Image: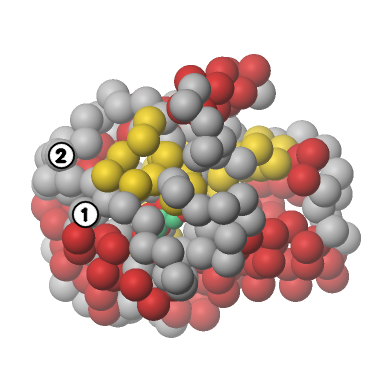
Amino acid sequence: MRIIQATSREEAVETAASLVLERILAHPTSVIGLATGRTMEPVYARFCELALTSRVPLSQTFFFLLDEYMGLPDGHPTSFKHYIRTHFLRPLSIPESQIAFPPAGDVDGPERYEELLRESHGVDLQLLGIGQNGHIGFNEPGSDKTSRTRVVRLTEETISANRGQLTDIIPEKALSMGIGTIREAKSLLLLATGKTKAEAIKYLMNHHDDPTCPATFLKDHPHFTLVLDPDAASRINLNI
Ligand code: F6R
């Protein structure tokens, strides 16, 4: 696990955006896994600025969205589809033929998404946030290290942490890539910012393969980069 401890939140965001950009610049045909959430908003804003000014060739890159709420009308303002259109696709004029959205409305959605991932020869770089309870994607505590894309029930903790982002419908379930699915990405880039993530990061640093904190399942991935801002890193001491 490579840990990059930034000296400010801005620097952490810049680092994450630059790592994605560098990957695409070096390999324009990359497959990139995108996460959503508050943590990623400034990352996408910065990525868009950098990509537009440096004219990154994005037309051959393909994207997969990590997860999606269930039970929302297609493109509902709470949906991750809406989020990624707003923060990423539209600012960069990326057509929707270049992204796969989790088919959250379909009974065979999980199997189809796995098949699509296989057909695309997997994700090259997966961008990830972390929940306050250590969830990755929507793999809540109790998830299995080998879990595949599936429908998951959200914990009360996750629903209440995300309440500010929810509107008229409060989703109780989501379709999420599994931990086993995520681990198949060739490289993982997890960004944690803010004090609310400090406990989860401390737990992550001190535990391995612990189902109560699914993020620990990523630690033995051969190419796992963890980017932290000072607040997220405030309960760990990397100098020990
Ligand atoms: C989002 C996702 C979640 C978030 C996590 C953190 O696609 O899969 O795991 O990364 O809930 O969310 P924020 O960044 O809003 O704190």
Residue 180 rendering spot, x and y as whole percentages? 35, 27
Display coloring: secondary structure
Ligand 1 is found in the corner quadrant, namely bottom left
* Quarter occupied by the N terminus: top left
- Which residue, given by chain and number where applicable, does mark 1 sit on? 155
Q: Label 2 near label 1: C-beta < 8 Å?
A: no
Q: Is residue 219 visible?
A: no
Q: Quadrant of residue 102?
A: top right
Q: Residues within 10 Å of mark 2 (few under 14, many from 20)?
A: few
Q: Residue at x 20, y 63 (%)?
A: 157
Q: Label 1 is placed on what type of residue? A: Thr
Q: Which mark is residue 24?
A: none
In depth, the one of 59 and 102 nearer the eye is 102
Q: Which mark is residue 142?
A: 2
Q: Earlier in the sequence, mark 1 or mark 2?
A: 2
Q: Residues within 10 Å of mark 1 (few under 14, many from 20)?
A: some
In depth, the one of 147 and 16 nearer the eye is 147
In depth, the one of 199 and 6 nearer the eye is 199
